[in-house]
Image (cartoon, rainbow, N blue to C red):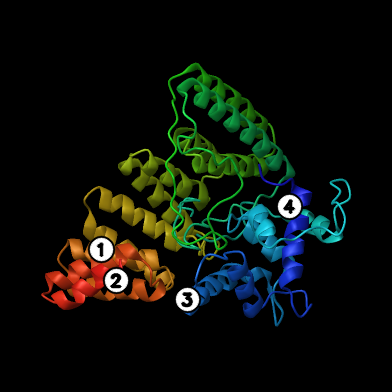
Amino acid sequence: MAAPRNLRSEKVQRIFERFDANGDGGLNREEMSALVVAVNPRVRFSDEQISAILDEVFRTYAEFIEQPTGLTLQGLLRTYDDGAGDVDRDFDALSLSFPHPPSPSSPSAASSATSAALAADDPSTSSFVDTSFQARRPSVAPWTSSSPNHGIAFESTWSLLEDLGILIKRLRSKQIQNSGAGDNNNNNFDSLSEAGWSREIDHAERRIYWNESGPDYTLFVKELSTLRARADATAREEAFDAHMAMGRSLYEHHLFQEALASFRRACDLLPTDARPHFRAGTALYALGRNGEAKEEFLLALEAAEASGNQWVQLLPQIHVNLGIALEGEGMVLNACEHYREAAILCPTHFRALKLLGSALFGVGEYRAAEKALEEAIFLRPDYADAHCDLGSALHAMGDDERAIQEFRRR
């Protein structure tokens, strides 16, 4: 399970202090670049990849950027709260330690200030970026999975998540015992972590399968309903925060039906908020319910566009996921429009460009497909699927020599 809140904040502070080389209280682009590289020791980033990651960080968390120093401590904490990195993994990867054992009852001044600021942050008005979708969470490249902002605003939500983590572990343990399986691709129970800029590129996501027909699962659902009742007993904004966070955790563990119930409850609480509609759409798509997913993404798009700049950072991913849902229903030309819009809104969104290129190839627009796929590869040179589709487009245009080169690069 993820670190308790105070310990988590102190770990972020230690990471921040390690890379604030000039001691000015902010992480500039050079310092942030060093952080990204250090917590991914086995990844060889290109200059373009680092630049794209930093552009996204500084654009997404502009409210936490102070000139000329850079990203503040509170901003770094927010990136971790949004699922852009795994605090425990990064802390260990950097071989950091505390000068003295951290005391849960005596958090540092910085931790207290940050916690207070987050507690005062209204989840209905906080800014956020794209998932992950993944997708959350979602297991794609560095910043496409840190969507939308799931910064947790209330201490009660952390307590619910800890209890939910216990329920999930218990369910998994019982199902392993009942099946006699040793692993079954389901041993990740960090309900607060998500793919992000500190996750290694091309880290393959393992599918988790649950037996939903047995008594263990029935008991899990019953106990989960108790947690939801605890959330509903709080004020509306606090309940919204809790249901969104529980939905995200359930989704990350591929408990898609239960995640959907949480996101729909969040939709009921704040129907004009784009985030729960977006997340409900991802859960529906994971369940194979493309038509319903499309409708939720359309609601998310409507809410985001009606809110001015409040959800501007989520718009690219809404367009991407809406495009995926449309393509799943055979509406490829409509999907192309949304992929293209996502790429316009976020020029570094290489997944949108790859999806656009693949869709254009599918409708015979080979030259346009070539351009989109080349742009995706420029942003991510090791994008195997993009190389493969580009090779197919080149072959369709009769350029077999270049096509062979692309196929060899995949």
Residue 113 is left or right of residue 202, and the answer is: right
Q: Mark on residue 8?
A: 4
Badge 3 local density, few (<14 within 10 Å), some, or many (20+)?
few
Q: How far apart are marks 2 and 1 (CA)?
A: 8 Å
Q: How far apart are marks 4 and 1 (CA)?
A: 41 Å
48 in relation to 5, above or below: below
375 in relation to 3, above or below: below
Q: Earlier in the sequence, mark 4 or mark 1?
A: 4
Q: Closer to the camera, 131 or 229?
A: 131
Which residue is the site of mark 1?
A: 358
Which residue is the site of mark 3?
A: 46
Q: Earlier in the sequence, mark 2 or mark 1?
A: 1
Most distant residue in the top direction: 215
- In the rendered image, residue 131, in percent from the top left (x then y), is placed at 48, 55
Quarter of the picture containing the C terminus is bottom left
- In the rendered image, residue 227, in percent from the top left (x then y), is placed at 63, 30
175 in relation to 124, above or below: above
Badge 4 local density, few (<14 within 10 Å), some, or many (20+)?
some
| Secondary-structure class at tag 2 | helix
Q: Which of marks 4 and 3 is nearer the N terminus?
A: 4
Which residue is the site of mark 2?
A: 373
Marks 1 and 3: which is nearer the front? Answer: 3
What is the three-letter code of the residue carrying label 3? Ser
